[in-house]
Image: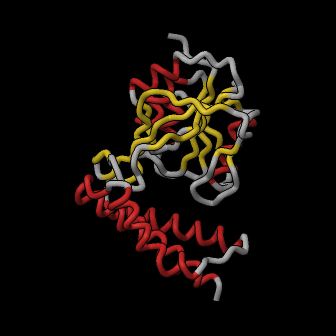
Amino acid sequence: MNKPPITGVIITKNEVAQIGKTLEALLPCCSEVLVFDSGSTDGTIEICKNLGATVVQTQWLGYGQTKNLGHKMAKNDWILSIDADEVINEELAKNIQAIHLNNSKIIYQLKRYEILNNYEIRFTIFKPSFKPRLFHKNEAKWDNKKVHETLTFNTNHRLMPIAGKLLHYSNDSFESFQKQTKKYAFLAADDLFKKGKTISFVKKYFGPTFTFFKSFIILGGIFDGKIGYTVSKMAANSIKWRHQYYNEMDK
């Protein structure tokens, strides 16, 4: 099957542990793959080049703005945005290859499944969810958030899911999960502080407890057992750490 006229876009920095699997799954879906690397020193660049991706070395502009470079440099009109720790499964790859890309007003969504310590999470705040990832480059762009960037597009665009799984291997241990959570909490606090936003009394003192209850009880994290509890607890800690970092910045 011929590769569709899609440009895959990935941003990287020291992703040697995962980038090979990510690219091997992505390459059949795209006639071009652009990797925007911000200073890898662990062999990531060499792996990407050896697998046939085009590597663009660039300074770090933030998640969203670095991804947006792909829109400007892509040879194709359609962009498939994948994170360096995400893997397209076989079903999803076949369905992407079969799409007729003739309507620029459609934003295609991929269903992402979180994998923690080799366990596929079914519930909690990390339950499987659809993410807009395949789109016409003139119809959507990423925002400027420092963390958890969002794809923005007009409300008249139609969202369409593609069957299959996008597997997110974000952490291979609970230690790395905690480290990543603290990093994102800091970035979120910094974003709030620089925008001049404040944290309400209710969110500050009740936010962590409500977040745990929502993840573990309302969203069914209890059915994921020990990992469900750990994820829910980490989600609560994320809110607590965000407030702590914000308070330190506000002194």
Q: Quadrant of the C terminus?
A: bottom right
* Way the structure is coloured: secondary structure
Instruction: Kindly indicate the quadrant of the structure image that contains residue 73.
Output: top right
Residue 15 in sight from this viewpoint = yes
Q: Viewed as shown, does residue 104 lie left or right of 125?
A: right
Q: Nearer the viewer, residue 215 or 178?
A: 215
Residue placed most toward the observer, 5 or 156: 156
The quarter holding residue 120 reads top left
Q: Residue at x 61, y 15 (%)?
A: 100
Q: Position of residue 108 (x, y in %)?
A: 58, 31
Q: Position of residue 168 (x, y in %)?
A: 42, 44
Nearer-the-camera pick, 141 or 173: 141
Farthest-out residue, bottom:
251
What x and y, as percent, mark residue 179? Answer: 42, 66
Q: Is residue 30 left or right of residue 211?
A: right
Spot the residue most to the front: 218
For image coordinates 47% across by 77% down, the residue present is 206
Counting every numbered tag in the picture gives 0
In this view, 192 is above or below 150: below
Task: Confirm whether residue 75 shows in the render.
Answer: no
Q: Quadrant of residue 147?
A: bottom right
Q: Relative to 129, does residue 195 appear above or below in the rendering?
A: below
Taking the view exactly as shown, the residue that stands out farthest to the left is 225
Q: Residue furthest top?
A: 1
204 or 42: nearer the eye? 204
Identify the residue at image location x=66%, y=50%: 64
Q: Is residue 247 above or below residue 104?
A: below
- Residue 3, percent across and down? 55, 16
User: Looking at the image, which residue is at 43% across and 70% down?
Assistant: 210
